Image (tube, coloured by chain):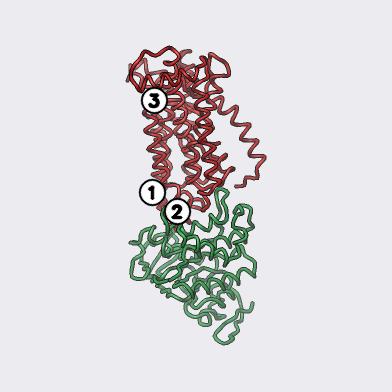
Chain colours: A green, B red
Amino acid sequence: MITVQGISYRAGHRFLVQRIDAAFTEGQIHLIIGPNGAGKSTLIKLIAGQLSPLEGTIHYGNDPLKQLTVTHLAKIRAVLSQNVDLAFPMQVAEVVMLGRYPHFSLRPTRLDEEACHQAMQRYDVLEMADRDYMTLSGGEKQRVHFARVTAQLWDPQPEQVRYLLLDEPLNSLDIYYQYDFMDKVRLLCDEQKLVVVGVIHDLNLAAKYADQLVLLHEGKILASGSPPEVLTPATIHQAYRMQVNTQLEGNKVRVLF
Amino acid sequence: MTAWNNRTRLIYLVLVLLVVVMALVSARYGAVRLEISDITASISKTLGGNGEMTLSERIFMDIRLPRVLLCILVGASLAVGGTLLQALFRNPIVEPGLVGTSSGAALGAALYFTLGAKFQINAGEWTLPIAACLGGVLATWLVLALSQSRDTGKSSIVTILLTGIAINALCISGVGFMSYIARDPQARSITFWGLGTLSGSNWHAVAIVGISTILTVLAAMRYAKQLNALMIGEGEAMFLGVNIRRLKLHVLTINVIMVAVATAFVGVISFVGLIVPHLLRMLHGSDNRYLITASVLLGALLLLAADFIARMAVPPAELPIGIVTSVVGVPIFIFLLRKNKYLF
């Protein structure tokens, strides 16, 4: 579980996020939504440890994030960002193997090879394993990074809780892969002991896949809870300045624009 | 990673063979042509510690052999330095001169040539290397200190590069000013040194550059894996367990020692540090574990070849080696760039 207590972060005089409290539990997908500039990416970067909060604390399980070393964190936490690009030509298989770097010291073990193979198979990148990453399309590149992150968290017998953070990972993908990836995130979350926290733009995608939603507005939490609780015409109007209707189907909600 | 498959072994094998052959050719031919028997006799007399050496044997032991060894060591240092910086800056146009090391060394040397005698600063044969090394280290330190952000204490790669370009320009104009106020022979020394020469090779230089090269290359290999992770960006590398700040500090320190010491003894030799990592990437990809070790060999090979050409082109005089590396290196490099699909 990741616990966030009263964290704030400021750039210049402007608070990007202010006194955020939240708890992200394992086995569930937590998605953060909100309009542009609401502080979504800042919040995920704070949780990932890429930024340090001005005040407040973040705990991974019982350990304060501040006390975890970069090396240790890399073994239990993976982050998938948008628009990751390479400086030099590199084979796809090598890029995926980067995900196993925290787990071996000199040469990859059989377990590392196995993890990469599984991950590449899952995201349909196995057949491009020998290709140069630079020659791939935007969508293909993002599939490679999904495979890399999956390899980083892959464990045949998961015991320890691990953490997957997603920072707008679906941006360069077409609709098919957006849904396909979220299905696979769901699968990964179920088979590995994962806490999944992600930032996502599409409200209906969020409604379909999230167990818990956090709606951010001007650096503060406007609403949080299950999708039907969070996605109401009132909250959406307040955050996005849009008049919408919502439709309930069982325990799922749909936003109609 | 596919770093250690058969193709890698083949590349290493071919490179080692070429270095050995080139070293032997370079040792044998020159202004005076040596026989193989001279070489073997010279080695056995030195090892045995007995017998007067003939002139040919002395040429081999006192001139050719230290020169060949220094070529190998300096070539290795410059090439590995280039590989390290390109990986650290995630930028294919970087070479060891970029953080100020080479131009700082050149300024140190120029100051010694013009003002050394006047101020009677003298440490014997060591004065020039010490002045150059100090210049290189100081200029690099200046670049790193000035590129540090006042708020966070961190320095971004782009700021380091820009500061490096600025400090380079400053050092180069310093060298220009020194040549301007120097007397003719001094100005000639400055020019000659700025283009690199191995004609001053001796066993002292071999020992010092040797220790520096071996230690720094071994240290550099420890960072190869982290530099691989850096290829997908600083933020992402951190998520893969790399302590970015420490990595930058350590790799830059290794690079400065490596390049400053080598440059101190042979002058500024451009292009080796730029071209070697690119040639190796075209051959077999960007894995830094392969690039660093193979850079040692290819850097040595290129510098041996360049020095051989420099000595053979206009005997008994010598061309400055920096001219050879550029004149021969540039066309090859551009040809390869255009021929290969080499994307960034």
**Which label number is shown at residue A107?**
2
Q: Position of residue A70 (x, y in %)?
A: 39, 58
For label 1, the residue is: B246
User: Residue A162 at x, y = what percent?
Assistant: 42, 68
To which chain does the residue with label 2 belong? A
Q: Position of residue A186 (x, y in %)?
A: 53, 74
Q: Amino acid type of disc 1?
A: Arg
* Circle nearer the viewer, 2 or 3: 2
Badge 2: residue crowd in 10 Å (few <14, some 14–19, many ≥20): few
Pointers 3 and 1 within a single chain: yes
Q: Secondary structure at mark 2?
A: loop
In the rendered view, tell whether residue A250 sits above or below residue B271: below
Give, as a three-letter code, the residue at label 2.
Arg
Spatial CA distance of label 2 from label 1 is 22 Å
Q: Position of residue B344 (x, y in %)?
A: 60, 47
- Residue B65: mark in rendering: none
User: How far is mark 3 from mark 1, CA to CA?
Assistant: 31 Å
Compute the Cα span from label 2 to label 3. Answer: 36 Å
State which tag comes first along the sequence, 3 or 1. 3
Amino acid type, callout 3:
Ala
Question: Image quadrant of residue A232?
Answer: bottom right
The answer to which of B287 and B39 lies nearer the viewer is B39
- Judging depth in this view, the residue of B19 and B230 nearest the camera is B19
Contact, mark 2 vs mark 3 (Cβ under 8 Å): no
Most foreground residue, A248 or B297: B297
Residue B234 relative to residue A250: left or right: left
Work out which residue is located at the far bottom of the displayed protein and give it: A250
Q: Which residue is mark 3?
A: B205
